[in-house]
Amino acid sequence: MQIMITHGGMSRTRVLHVSPVSVVLSVMALVIATLALSGAIYHYFFLKAAREGWPVVSQLVKLVVHDESAQRDKVMRENLDAMAQKVGDMQARMIKIEAMGDRVSGMAGLKPEDLSGVTRPKGGSGGPFVPMTNPGYNELNGALDALAEAAGEQSDVLTLTESRLLESRLKTLMIPSSRPIDVAVGSGFGFRADPFTGRGALHTGLDFPSPVGTEIHAAAGGVVRTAEMHPEYGLMLEIDHGNGLMTRYGHTSKILVKPGDLVKRGQVVADVGTTGRSTGPHLHFEVLVDGIPQDPQRFLAGPNAKPTVQTAAGNSTPLGAEHR
């Protein structure tokens, strides 16, 4: 870039050569100087005026600062109101969850004393839900802390309820209510004429006539207790279901599990045969409680049935009650 400087008359013309880099540096220097000057003026006049209370300038500064402060307060208030609305919604949902938790825990059989270590004591309370108006930060923080504590309590209650429901379901699975073979019963529980001697004798189980090799299913989940040859039951299988409850499968031709195995309800555990004291192929199925034979038909009535068991003293006790 060339800059020509001329004077009147016969004076000589001067030519200045300026490079682009010099122009850019000059402009940047000018901008920096302008900014520095503006900052100095702002600092000296406006801030000093605000501190010392100059008549005109201080009023302008106060108006600007007040407007900015009001704008910040407005934005903060709007945010706090929005948060308060969300906290109110969460409180309303938590009330519903607590009511639902109380109903579900009651259905699971949990008593108030079972929850004494989980939830806080509850006295009489109620009334309409009134959300907070113009809440502050501390109020919102306190409400969130209360919600977090209530959510933790409900989580513990639901965990305990789930555990109780699973325990109840496990007990149901351990009751022999499934038929080992889906055929009609040939001979029931009770006194009958012995097929070998013709004399009256107690038949301690149910007979399921089926061809040799028919699959036998576990009537409930449990642990295999015995799988051996017996002089009367033939090839015999016994499954322990806990709480003194056991099922026995007699006259089998083959046993597919061994002592100590964990079996599930409906699992194939043996095949029908005619071993031992038997007149033909069938399954002899028994249910015993504390070693006392029970009528299996009462258990096979369905999973919701509550069969009574015969104790050694001759008393009938609902299954699930305490046996001594």
Image (tube, rainbow, N blue to C red):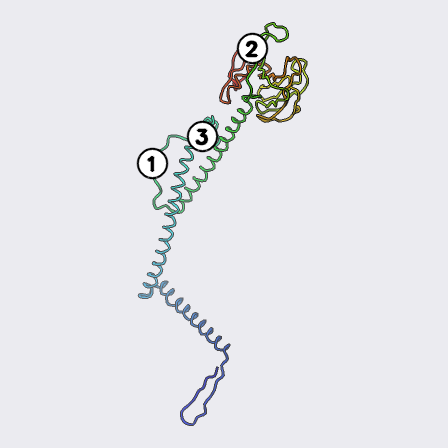
Q: Is residue 233 left or right of residue 179?
A: right
The answer for how far apart the CA atoms under marks 3 and 2 are is 42 Å
Whether residue 306 is situated above or below residue 126 in the rendered picture: above
**Label 3: how many Cα within 10 Å (few below 14, some 14–19, many 20+):** some
Q: Where is residue 84 in the image (x, y as percent from the top left)?
A: 38, 45
Q: Nearer the viewer, residue 108 or 15?
A: 108
Q: What residue type is labelled 2?
A: Gly
First in sequence, mark 2 or 1: give its number: 1
Residue at image position (52%, 29%) is 166
- The residue shown at (60%, 16%) is 284
Q: Which of marks 2 and 1 is in front?
A: 2
User: Would you identify the image quadrant in which residue 233 lies?
Assistant: top right
Percent from the top left, x then y, of residue 303?
51, 22
Query: Residue 267 sits in which quadrant?
Result: top right
Q: Is mark 2 on a helix, strand or loop?
A: strand
Q: Give the residue type at disc 3.
A: Val
Q: Is residue 139 above or below residue 98?
A: below
Q: Name the residue under label 1.
A: 128
For mark 2, what is the residue? 190
